[in-house]
Structure formats: C-alpha cells, structure tokens
Image: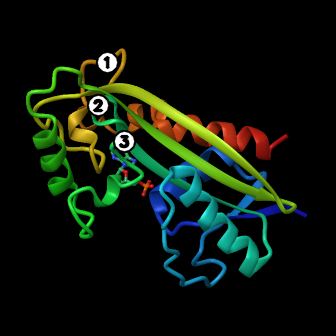
Amino acid sequence: MKKKIVFATNNTHKLEEVSAILGDKIELLSMKDINCKADIPETADTLEGNALIKARFIFENYHSDCFADDTGLEVEALEGAPGVYSARYAGDTHNSEANMKKLLHDMEGIENRKAQFRTVFALIVDGKEHLFEGTVKGEIVKNRKGTSGFGYDPIFVPEGYTQTFAEMGNELKNKISHRAVATNKLCKFLMK
Ligand code: IMP
C-alpha cells in the first residue's frame, strides 16, 4: 500500500512544490484532506519550535506520520530579525508591503545588507522527530524590484544572481530557494 503522509498546511503552492518532488511514491495529504480545520498557534520563538508545534499537533490528534514547515528571513545587521516573526513583522495583518516597508526603513543607513531565507521542516515518522533545514544566502536591496513571487521576494537578491527573487520568476526561484533545498532533503529522507 502507498505510504501516506500529512503536510500540516493548506497552502496549495507548498503542497504542489513538495508533491512534485515526491512524485507518486508517497501520497501527500493536506490538513483539509484529514478534515483538520484548526488554526494551530505558532507561539515558539524559533522556526524549529513552530514547525515542531504544528507537526506534533497533527501527530497527537490524528496519529499520522506528518510534517510541517516554518520559514523566516534573517538579516545579519538586525541580529537575525525579522526571522521567526517574518510574516507579522509590521503587525498581525501579515501584509507583505507593510513588512517590506518596515524592513527597508529599519535598514536605512546600514551598509551590511547580508541576509538569508531559512526554511525548517519538522517531520514525525513512526513517532520519531526529524528536522531538515534549507537556506539561501543573499542581500537586501534598497528598492523593490520585480512582481512575481510573494513576501519579501522584491527586495531579496540571492548570492550569485543580480535579480531579486521577484524579478527572476518562480521557475528559477523554486529551483534554488531555501524551501527547495529543505524540501529536497525531506523528500530524500522519505524515499529512503
Ligand atoms: P511561512 O513560514 O512559509 O509561512 O513564511 C513566513 C513568512 O516568511 C511569509 O509570510 C513571508 O513573509 C516570508 N517568506 C517565506 N518564504 C518566502 C519566500 O520564498 N519569499 C519571500 N518571503 C518569504
């Protein structure tokens, strides 16, 4: 029988990204597929902590193998901020424009523009927990450029490239991104 695993998300973009790598060897289920309507509170102060909260919630309530993710943008000169608070940096409305505006404001006059996106997956298989990480290093530019992607994409240029994530388009971004690196590690483990 085909192995089933729950991805603790309803984000269709993330589900598609992971299922494209997993192929048809493992059946991926979303929270909707298992009829879970919970809005799991992300109350930890690390990406690892939040990913584990979500995975443990599914494991404890649905007794299924599962995994969850959390991502943040870590700016060197801001000691890793916005980090785990990336989605709500400018407030609880989770507004990307406001988040970018606040970040550019906080970085005014700062020469060190180094930053990285970091994704963490927490996986629970047969009751055992595993963590996988993917990072992409780069720089925060001073003005927004490009229209594709989401979140902080218009102000992040990955190392080795001249375009922001939002200028390069999703096809290239999804090959080199933090999430792609972490997803590949997770899928390699699941397909062992
Ligand atoms: P999540 O954990 O994937 O929901 O990401 C948390 C927040 O990080 C999002 O709301 C975005 O602001 C930011 N973020 C995550 N991944 C990306 C990305 O690939 N590009 C730009 N921003 C991202």
Q: Is residue 7 visible?
A: no
Q: Based on the displayed image, in which of its 4 quarters is residue 30 positioned?
A: bottom right
Cα–Cα span, label 2 and label 1: 9 Å
What residue is rendered at 25% in x and 44% in y? 148
Name the residue type under label 1.
Tyr
Label 3 CA crowd tier, 10 Å (few <14, some 14–19, many 20+): many
Q: Is 79 above or below relative to 90?
A: above
Tell me which numbered mark, 1 or 3, is placed earlier along the sequence. Answer: 3
Name the residue type under label 3.
Leu
Q: Secondary structure at mark 2?
A: helix
Q: Based on the displayed image, in which of its 4 quarters is residue 91 positioned?
A: bottom left
Q: Secondary structure at mark 3?
A: strand
Residue designated by label 2 = 168
Cα–Cα span, label 2 and label 3: 18 Å
Q: Say whether mark 1 is within 8 Å of ligand 1.
A: no
Residue designated by label 1 = 161
